[in-house]
Image (cartoon, rainbow, N blue to C red):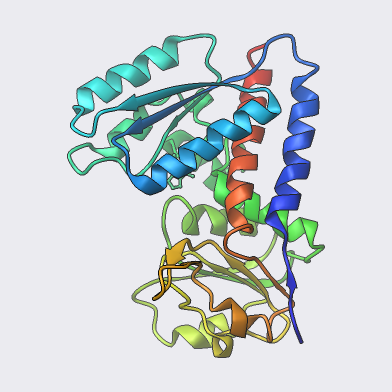
Amino acid sequence: MTAQWIDGREIAKAIRLGVKEEISTLVRKPALAVVMVGENPASVVYVRNKIKACQEVGITSIERVMPQDSTEECLLETIRALNEDNGIDGILVQLPLPAHINAKAVLEAIDPNKDVDGFHIFNTGKLFTTGEGFKPCTPAGIIELLKATGTPIAGRHAVILGRSNIVGKPMAMLLLQENATVTITHSHTQELAAHTRQADILVAAIGRAKFVTADMVKPGAVVIDVGMNRDENGKLCGDVDTDAVKEVASWVTPVPGGVGPMTIAMLMVNTLTSAKTRQ
Ligand code: GUN
């Protein structure tokens, strides 16, 4: 079997188009504040792409780039001002933050009603209980990718590699809401391949280049690659050895062009959702 590619760029484009159409009917354009501390090269690229997407769909973006040595208090003050600004619908603090800043304290300073990344503990709590609130963009985008391919989720076994707060844990909750049977694996998991080989849906989010090999994949599985790494030749690659895995799986996401564009599309969706509550 040779897997089909899941074209995240096309699926994300359709979602952005829907957002753009809906924004054109609003009295006031949504506004998203993007805060970045320092200029981590990967963050610079992500932020640039987020701002480009805002321009495309009609969201006003406000960029606050703060020096690498900014104090936590200064960042908290910036967030407080954005919280109080009625013209701002969404606040995003790009991660990672410099080591001297307590990221948890910063994320919890964001008004949960403007937390379009879905990282505030209030939204995390809602995700784990009622399923309401802002959903983290990457896992929410993965659910959209699965639905776009017609992959049944209910009753299927989904195995997640990685337990981060940004991807692994919220991914498990979203899959559970879709009635999947969910396994989270991590660095202490024993017999890892025995788990991954049971996956109808395999989500790799561990940040290790080409870690998932063909022998770890069940024939016909849908494989979602969240990784963004460099291989031994410096070429961009994911957590999945896609060349080999695509001979076993039924669907595979490419890197780049799979999950990445979906994260940004879902950020646009969340910002629109927020703006609609403040029109
Ligand atoms: N760093 C890596 N992914 C993300 C994300 O989705 N949001 C933010 N704010 N920072 C990130």
Please tell me which residue is depicted at 63% across the width and 66% down the height of the picture.
254
Q: Nearer the viewer, residue 174 or 245?
A: 245
Above or below for 208 versus 12:
below
Q: Position of residue 138 (x, y in %)?
A: 56, 50
Query: Would residue 19 be visible to someone looking at this image?
Result: yes
**Quarter holding the N terminus?**
bottom right
Q: Position of residue 63 (x, y in %)?
A: 44, 24
Q: Nearer the viewer, residue 162 or 57?
A: 57
Please tell me which residue is depicted at 73% across the width and 64% down the height of the picture.
153
Residue 2 appears left or right of 109: right
Q: Which residue is at the far front?
A: 233
Q: Position of residue 31 (x, y in %)?
A: 57, 19
* Ligand 1 in which quarter: top left
Residue 96 appears left or right of 243: left
Give the total of numbered labels.
Answer: 0
Residue 83: quarter of image: top left
Residue 259: quarter of image: bottom right
Q: Nearer the viewer, residue 194 or 155?
A: 194
Please tell me which residue is depicted at 75% across the width and 41% down the height of the picture.
15
Please tell me which residue is depicted at 52% across the width and 52% down the height of the picture.
170
Residue 263 appears left or right of 248: left
Above or below for 181 versus 20:
below
Q: Position of residue 34 (x, y in %)?
A: 45, 28
Above or below for 27 versus 99:
above
Residue 68 appears left or right of 109: left
Query: Would residue 178 be visible to someone looking at this image?
Result: no
**Quarter holding the C terminus?**
top right
Above or below for 242 versus 54:
below
Q: Which residue is at the far bottom?
A: 215
Residue 36: quarter of image: top left
